[in-house]
Amino acid sequence: MANCLGVTAPAVNKWENGNAYPDITLLAPIARLLGISTDLLLSYREELTDKEITGMAACLGEKLRKEAYGQAFSWAEERILEYPNCDKLILTMAQILDSYRYIVKAADAETYDGRIHGFYVRALNSKDQEIAQAAAAALFYFCLSKEEFDTAQEYLDQIQERTVNPDRLQAVLYQRQGKTEEAYERYERLLFSSYGDINWALNGIHTLALEEHDVDKAEKMAEKQRQLAELLEMGKYMEVSPGLDLAVLKQDKEAAIQIMTDLVHNIKHVDGFRNSKLYEHMSFSNSGKKNFAFMLLKELEEEESIDFIKDDRRYKMLMRELKNMAEE
């Protein structure tokens, strides 16, 4: 290659080892010499696969757990610069960076507002309506956290309201066409998403009741959430989690410790729905259990409302167990 390009062998060696780059005028000759296009030579691609985006998201989560927030942020920015037209990657990175800066208590967390907001706006302008709608929801929550209520309303108004869920009609169409596997998958998807909607509403009522110290109502909502998770086979973790806030409000140390124990011991099965026959035709991405363990660890370590538990030997053991999970 050195002879053909009129350069020295050590120069080519530096290219191979990533210690230097060839002059831009040599790119076309190198591509011709190798019998490939310049796009392939530069590993150029317009888009990434969902699997690749999931992998990058997992890598970012790993960096956020082990490195300084600023370093992880810079790494994510580099990926976005590398694939500037991949709206799904931009949205995914922005959502992770936005949530983690508070979880890891990043220094000067607010200084990242402008760049994260900018990523969301780029995703909002995506031609893919699913991405644009997800970005509008993310911007709604972003402005809500800043108490910019008028702007939050503007983003909320951009979220489309559907009078008919197209998945319902698609499921019926598949069924009538004899496409059994596709019909099963669409019905299961409806069931799975309906759990999210109903649980969201029950949790909202549960939270309002806790704020008003209406223990009876909070207990009823927590029980409804438990029953719903059990009915739709979402896993033990989702069944027990609603009771923790209630136990903390009542300052019930034994109940709180028991719920925390159940959460920690079932975190490896937080996606228990994967093994349910109710969703056997659906495919799910990796759940990122290490990330989940890390977030639960941070929440339980830093939540002031459970200070009455933190001296307990069992609490300390659970924290060590969570830390080990997050570092595995």
Image: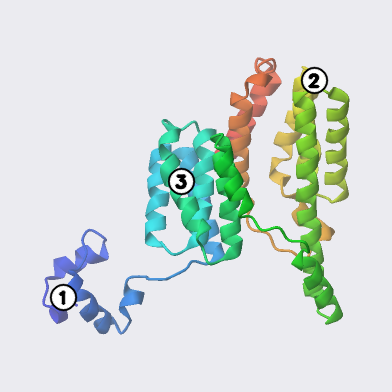
Quadrant location, the N terminus? bottom left
Tell me: residue 218, above or below residue 135. Answer: above
Nearer the observer: mark 1 or 3; the answer is 3
Question: What is the three-letter code of the residue carrying label 2?
Answer: Glu
Identify the secondary structure beneath mark 1.
Answer: helix
- Which residue does the numbered mark 2 point to in the structure image? 254
Question: What is the three-letter code of the residue carrying label 3?
Answer: Ile
Residue 171 visible in rendering: yes
CB-based contact (under 8 Å), mark 2 and mark 3: no
Q: Position of residue 101 (x, y in %)?
A: 49, 37
- Which residue does the numbered mark 1 point to in the structure image? 2
Q: Residue, x 23% and y 79% (percent of image)?
A: 28
Q: Earlier in the sequence, mark 1 or mark 2?
A: 1
Q: Classify residue 247 as left or right of residue 6.
A: right
Q: Residues within 10 Å of mark 1 (few under 14, many from 20)?
A: few
Q: Earlier in the sequence, mark 2 or mark 3?
A: 3
The span from disc 2 to disc 3 (Cα, nearest Å) is 41 Å
The span from disc 1 to disc 2 (Cα, nearest Å) is 73 Å
Decide which of 55, 39 is in the foreground and name it. Answer: 39
Tell me: residue 122, above or below residue 62. Answer: below
Residue 281 visible in rendering: no
Identify the secondary structure beneath mark 3.
Answer: helix
Quadrant location, the C terminus? top right
Q: Position of residue 151 (x, y in %)?
A: 55, 43
CB-based contact (under 8 Å), mark 1 and mark 2: no
- Which residue does the numbered mark 3 point to in the structure image? 116
Question: What is the three-letter code of the residue carrying label 1?
Answer: Ala
Q: Position of residue 184 (x, y in %)?
A: 82, 69
